[in-house]
Image (tube, helix red, strand yellow):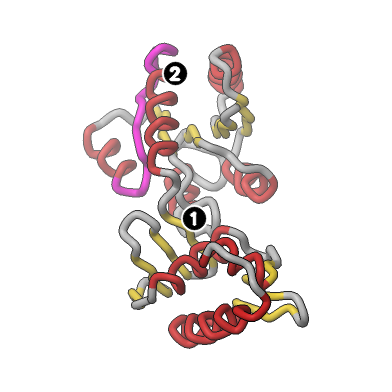
Amino acid sequence: MKQILVIEDEADIRELMEFNLKTAGFVPTGTANANDALMLLKETHYDLILLDLMLPGLQGDQFLKILRRMDRVSDIPVMIVSAKDSEDEIVSGLDAGADDYLTKPFSIKVLLAKTAALLRRSGSTGRETASHSGICVNSETHRASVDGRDIQLAAKEFELLLLFVRNPEKVFTRNQLLNTIWGYEAEIFTRTVDAHISSLRKKLGEKGRLIRSVPKIGYRMEK
């Protein structure tokens, strides 16, 4: 079931949203401030964030900017749910990185419909973009970049990088990489993996050091 993070400081509104989301078959988690939300994001995978803008401490728009720069969670869809209802405020929220905007007071039916639509949209894209430590890989456009600078990769290098970025700290044996990327396993061909890893590291520049050798086993992407 889809996990939804609700960031709303008004308890009555937060509890109303949580109740209706749960009734609709989602798994909501509510918090009253953005700082706690950042901690929750480090512990749990969420499929959608519902975000109030006027919060105690860290404001909603500040949280959104931080989120869009964070590894592994930067592509979570976000819907702002706010009493700020002017045209300029709505445009500003969308420009800041929100995927949708719902003004208060809101209809529960509209909230649930927008929630379902955002989840469908994010599911259909298959989370094309993966990022880690300034390395960004988009499986739909087949583009990779380091700190915003595009790099040119061969097909197998791209697939290797995408696998590592999506699975930081996971150790892959050479045979696992052969099977996943090349579609076969054979000890004699493991040097093919080593050659591609060496080339990939060079193209990543300083970030190439993040792909670490695990002696007598294989490779992993360091956090």
Q: Position of residue 17 (x, y in %)?
A: 54, 19
Quadrant where the C terminus is found in the figure: bottom right
> What residue is disc 2 on?
112
Check residue 101 for magenta coloring.
Answer: yes
Vertical order, 20 against 175 (above or below) = above
Q: Position of residue 198 (x, y in %)?
A: 54, 86
Pick out the residue farthest to the right: 216
Quadrant where the N terminus is found in the figure: top right
Q: CA distance from mark 1 to mark 2?
A: 26 Å
Residue 201 appears in the figure: yes
The amino acid pointed to by label 2 is: Leu
What label sits on residue 66 in the rendered view?
A: 1
Q: Earlier in the sequence, mark 1 or mark 2?
A: 1
10 left or right, relative to 97: right
Mark 2 surroundings: few (<14), some (14-19) or many (≥20) residues within 10 A: some
* Residue depth check, mark 1 versus mark 2: number of the one nearer the observer: 2
Magenta stretch in the rendered image: 95-110
What label sits on residue 152 in the rendered view?
A: none
26 left or right, relative to 116: right
| Quadrant hosting residue 90 | top left
Which residue is rendered at x = 44% and y = 37% of the image?
123
SS for tag 2? helix
